[in-house]
Amino acid sequence: MRLYMMRHGETDWNKAHLWQGRTDIPLNDKGRYVAELTREGLKDIHIDYAFCSPLCRAKETAEIVLRGRDVELTVDERIIEMGFGPFEGRDMRDVTEETRIFFEHPDQYQVPEGAEGFDEILEREKSFLDELCANPKYQDSNILIATHGAALRGLAAVIKGLPVSRYWEGGVHKNCGMTIVDYKDGKYEIVDEAIILYDEKDLK
């Protein structure tokens, strides 16, 4: 089994450096263009199955990447973005002690009301991966997974067996950035991490 785990394309909130989380912000024109470039980058890769977050930016990214293929897209709530609660809509460049701890010491993060903790996101993403990898139907398949920045770091943490303190290790993927993982005989192997399948010079 090979997993193509991808972050969504750009949104206006990404461009403005705002916390998004569960706020359902659509792709902007650049986000759709980068998804099209990523689709071109994957044109020679056969995709058997595809999963996406229920948020429209991830779903539309997957739909663009899969355009022209006969692949059913399955929405799975377990790969939705982390809920940031009161942070959502705030400028990420306005660093507070609370947001500094969130990124630098996630194991010390005190979850505000309405937000999601790191243990919660890791638990649901582990459930998603465990169920996927245990299903004989998927064993010899290439699978696209369209998700989000923090959620993708969580999937990588589950795959690597990282503690919460190392949750952000490797940083957040660029828009449509992708990590490719092989799974066989109960073991994960990272083939490529945080790569992009487009030339950034094409975006200028």
Image (tube, rainbow, N blue to C red):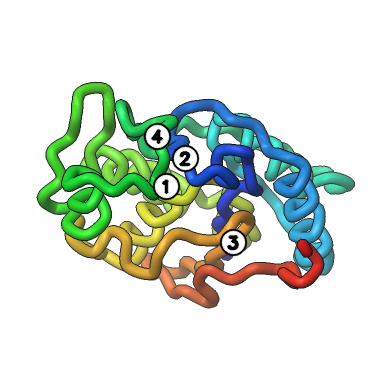
Residue 197 at x, y = what percent?
70, 68
153 up-or-down from 41: above or below:
above
Residue type, label 1: Ala
Residue type, label 3: Gly
Give the Cα separation between the discs numbered 2 and 1.
16 Å
Which residue is at the front of the view, 61 or 142?
61
Give the Cα separation between the discs numbered 3 and 1.
13 Å
Q: Secondary structure at mark 3?
A: loop
Q: Which residue shows up at 27% across the image and 29% down it?
A: 115
Give the Cα separation between the discs numbered 4 and 1.
19 Å
User: In the image, which disc is placed on residue 151?
Assistant: 1
Q: Nearer the viewer, mark 2 or mark 1?
A: 2
Q: Quadrant of residue 201?
A: bottom right
Give the Cα separation between the discs numbered 4 and 2.
5 Å
Looking at marks 2 and 1 on the same chain, the residue that comes earlier in the sequence is marked by 2
Label 4–label 2 contact, CB within 8 A: yes
Left or right, residue 14 beside residue 108: right
Left or right, residue 171 beside residue 113: right
